Amino acid sequence: MNGIRIASATSSVMFMGKRASVKKAPKPKVETITDEMGTSTYTTHFDVDRVFYPKGLTEYHFTGKNFDASRDIAQTASLIRQEIKSQISEKKLPKVKYSIRIQRYPGGQSLRMTIKGLPFPLVTSESLKIGEKIKARRDRKIPQNHYLAKYSFINYGLVDLTPKALDVLQQTKAILKSYNSESYIMGPGDGGYNHFYESVEYDLDYVISEREKVQHALKKA
């Protein structure tokens, strides 16, 4: 684990007939959260350099409920396709084109999904106006009470999408994550590791086309 260890608690022992003070490291705090995707564990260590980690150093580890370290990424992609089909048949996801691509490269691998052809609007005149208001904020932040704040993956490229479109992203992202694992240290300058890089996004040409349709209609109105 990174960080310089320091002791912040003491105990005493007998040494050559005299009681001596011995530094004892505080126990780490462990918090475990299980949801529909898998299990997250946060382990906070307090015996570290408080200059760099004033609140302690927290290690994060996530294991998806469907994760299998021995499974090849091509098999994982196949299982995800099957789950997508299952959720479509159960009407949990819309019947659209979900494209999954895998890639292997030195030091890692990736699984990327693109989506297009929603049966409902990706963008509306109302969602465009909401996106413009968010982008115009001086603090460039989404208010905590805003409906967009519930999407942990939200960024400025997505703030003008409709809630239904964002829900589809959220559901498919959860599926991918349930087949993955990741670990990292929550602190300045520290990296992490995941079994494969994952991403879910709408096809760029599809997004541009849908935005242009709505913008064109607004200009004509």
Image (cartoon, rainbow, N blue to C red):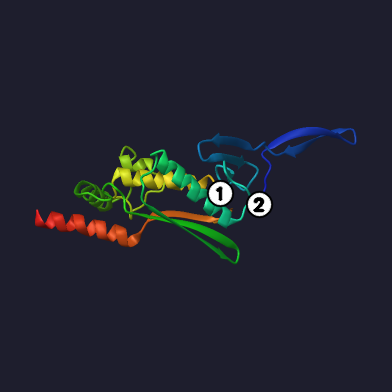
Foreground disc of the pair 1, 2: 2
Q: Which mark is residue 180?
A: 1
Relative to 122, 213 lies left or right: left
Q: Is residue 153 visible to us here?
A: yes
- Give the Cα separation between the discs numbered 1 and 2: 12 Å
Task: Name the one closer to the observer, 118 or 88.
Answer: 88
Name the residue: 66% across, 39% down: 8
Relative to 184, 154 lies left or right: left
Amino acid residing under circle 2: Ser
Name the residue: 53% across, 44% down: 178
Question: From this viewpoint, which residue is outermost toward the right?
Answer: 16
Task: Name the one closer to the observer, 191 or 158.
Answer: 158
Mark 1 closeness class: few <14, some 14–19, many ≥20 residues within 10 Å: many
Task: Name the one closer to the observer, 43 or 117.
Answer: 117
Question: From this viewpoint, which residue is outermost toward the front?
Answer: 89
Name the residue: 20% across, 46% down: 126
- Secondary structure under badge 2? loop
Residue 30 percent location from the top left of the image: 61, 36
Residue 70 percent location from the top left of the image: 66, 52
- Secondary structure under badge 1? loop
Q: Is residue 142 visible to us here?
A: no
Question: From this viewpoint, which residue is outermost toward the left?
Answer: 221
Looking at marks 1 and 2 on the same chain, the residue that comes earlier in the sequence is marked by 2
Query: Total of numbered circles in the picture?
Result: 2
Q: Which mark is residue 12?
A: none
Residue 214 percent location from the top left of the image: 19, 54
Amino acid residing under circle 1: Asn
Q: Residue beneath label 2, please?
A: 70
Name the residue: 22% across, 59% down: 212
Mark 2 closeness class: few <14, some 14–19, many ≥20 residues within 10 Å: few
Residue 61 percent location from the top left of the image: 59, 45
